[in-house]
Amino acid sequence: MTCTACDRLRQYCCGVGTTKRASFKDQTYWARPVPGFGDPGARVVIIGLAPAAHGANRTGRMFTGDGTGGSGDFLMTALHANGLANQTFSQDTGDGLRLTNAWITAAVRCAPPDNTPTPAEIGTCRTHLRAELAALRDACVYVALGRIALDAVWPVLAPLPAPARKPAFAHGAVVALSDGKSLVSSYHPSRQNTHTGRLTASMLADVFRLAVDLSSQARTV
């Protein structure tokens, strides 16, 4: 991706890629917008927040390279438990990770300072999210990881059509869209959530078990 629409994000990503973290000083950072990845025929689509500055902004793959036990490994463990990933870790683009029936993207494609994109940046990046979801023709279950992801994806899904009022965020909550598809909310597997016990491994695995069940029940459109 070569989008340069958000000056603040592009400056931050490039700056991080130049200064680097000491432990990655010999590596070349991706430092560009990070595309989604996974199975193009996926029925389950996962929407995260944004690339991590020294994770996906370095490796070029969402939820990849944020360290052992980081959000990427936590997420892949839950996906693996439900047959959506072939391994429980996501360390670099050559690690052999493959997703089956799942696609991973994010509300914002560029790493934001303090992991916090502005509403304007989310709105600008929604153009890419809308196009990406439209291309995933078999998708029928969307899993939003965190409140920001839910708020970002709702305007994309609402015209399907769906209930007009934006749903309140709650872990494990399901919104049935009127075209037979579903939107599921989950806490984001950030270290802040996983290290405090707000989100446990079993809680996240249960969310994806629910997503798989919903995808098997959804009618083909």
Image (tube, rainbow, N blue to C red):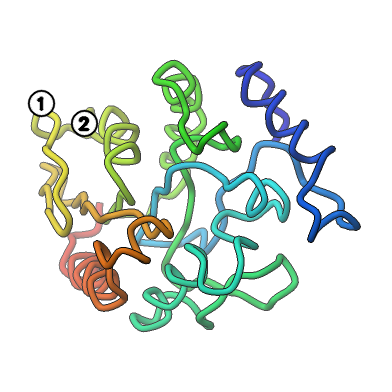
Q: Position of residue 209 (x, y in %)?
A: 24, 75
> Image quarter for residue 164?
top left
Residue pushed farthest right? Answer: 26
Check whether the beta carbons of the residues at disc 2 and disc 1 lie within 8 A of each other: yes
Q: CA distance from mark 2 to mark 1?
A: 7 Å
- Residue 111 percent coordinates (x, y): 59, 38
In the visual, does 201 lie left or right of 217? right
> Please, what secondary structure does the residue beneath circle 2 have?
loop
The residue beneath circle 2 is 158
> What residue do we see at 79% from left, 40% from top?
17
Q: Could you classify mark 1 by the number of other residues whose Cα lies within 10 Å: few (under 14), some (14-19), or many (20 or more)?
A: few
Return the residue nearer the eye: 33 or 70. Answer: 70
- Amino acid type shown at disc 2: Ala
The disc label shown at residue 4, or none: none
Q: Position of residue 136 (x, y in %)?
A: 44, 49
Q: Is residue 197 left or right of residue 59?
A: left
Q: Which mark is residue 164?
A: 1
Q: Residue at x 43, y 64 (%)?
A: 102
Q: Is residue 21 above or below residue 218?
A: above
Q: Secondary structure at mark 1?
A: loop
Q: Is residue 195 above or below residue 86?
A: above
Specify the amino acid type for callout 1. Ala
